[in-house]
Amino acid sequence: MPIIDITSPANPRLKLARSLHHRRNRRKHQQILLEGERLIADSLSAGMPPALFFFTPEAEARYPELLAQVEQTGAPMLRIPAHLFTQIADTATPQGVLAVSPIPQIEPGRQGLALILDGVRDPGNLGAILRTAAAADVDQVIILPGVTDPWSPKALRAGMGAHFRLAIRQAPTARVAQGWVEGYTIYFADAHASRRYTQVDWTPASALILGGETERARIIDLWPHIQPIAIPMARGVESLNVAVAGGVILYEAVRQRTQPRPSPS
């Protein structure tokens, strides 16, 4: 496809890209912004071509391999000057490449390990959690109302490609989420719990709820038969960052699920 030069800020494709900085427009169009060479390359390696691809003349010289990869997908190649690129960029020092891409639609896996997020409001934390979940081979990540948008530019950058390899499902209510993990044992990371996360058998179908301290009472009330578990900490330390806590617990599940099973005697 030939390169199209855009010079007007009123160009409809440029206006679409600008609109995707807002959550409501991402939902409306079911599209997201992928900014930077690494994130766009990750989406391509996952087999997810962009709908539009913007680049500056400077980036055209800097990233010839990326441009060649995008061109092979048949996506419109839109060259824009740097002063217009800053209108669609989210970073302080843009690399000069940005893609408009459909929101990935990935089916849940069948390993029997789910992650449920409630009250996670920082996009950097959310992206870090998703990155860990992808590495831990989590089947699905369920996002409850009140969680920051997993498709925001900052969450996407913090996820470092995890969004293209995870089933990320946004549940309108806790009841809907419960249906998605029916038959799973539900655990809740709770600093006040007496049971340690290492005392849990993570080999059956299991779901872990991660949430902020302010959501504790509501989560316990909403989820019947929930089992609170804690990470032991030194005296005087009240809690861990939610992304760190999630990583610690998920990798205990990975350890148990991957260790050799004793042979029958």
Image (spheres, grey):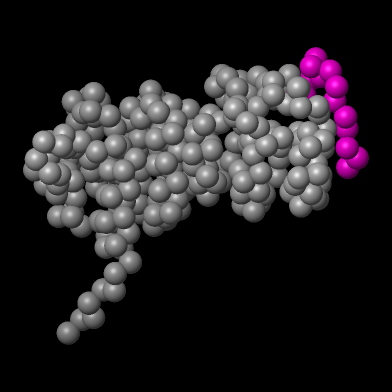
Whether 135 is drawn above or below 255: the answer is above
- Taking the view exactly as shown, the residue that stands out farthest to the bottom is 265
Compared to 196, does 212 lie above or below?
above
Q: In the rendering, at what x and y percent does residue 47 appear?
A: 66, 51
Residue 72 relative to residue 89: left or right: right
Q: Residue at x 35, y 43 (%)?
A: 115
Q: Quadrant of the C terminus?
A: bottom left
Can you see residue 101? no
Is residue 86 located in the magenta-colored stretch of the structure?
Answer: no
- Residue farthest toward the top in the current orientation of the protein: 10
**Residue range corresponding to the magenta coloring:** 1-14
Residue 78 picture location, percent across and down: 82, 33
The quarter of the image holding the N terminus is top right
The image quarter containing residue 2 is top right
Q: Is residue 184 left or right of residue 16?
A: left
* Residue in front for this viewpoint, 27 or 122: 122
Look at the image and tell me whether residue 136 can be seen: yes
Q: Is residue 145 left or right of residue 38?
A: left
The residue positioned 60% from the left and 22% from the top of the image is 21
Residue at (38, 23) in percent of width and height: 146
In reply to whether residue 10 is colored magenta, the answer given is: yes
Compared across the picture, whether 133 is left or right of 236 comes to right
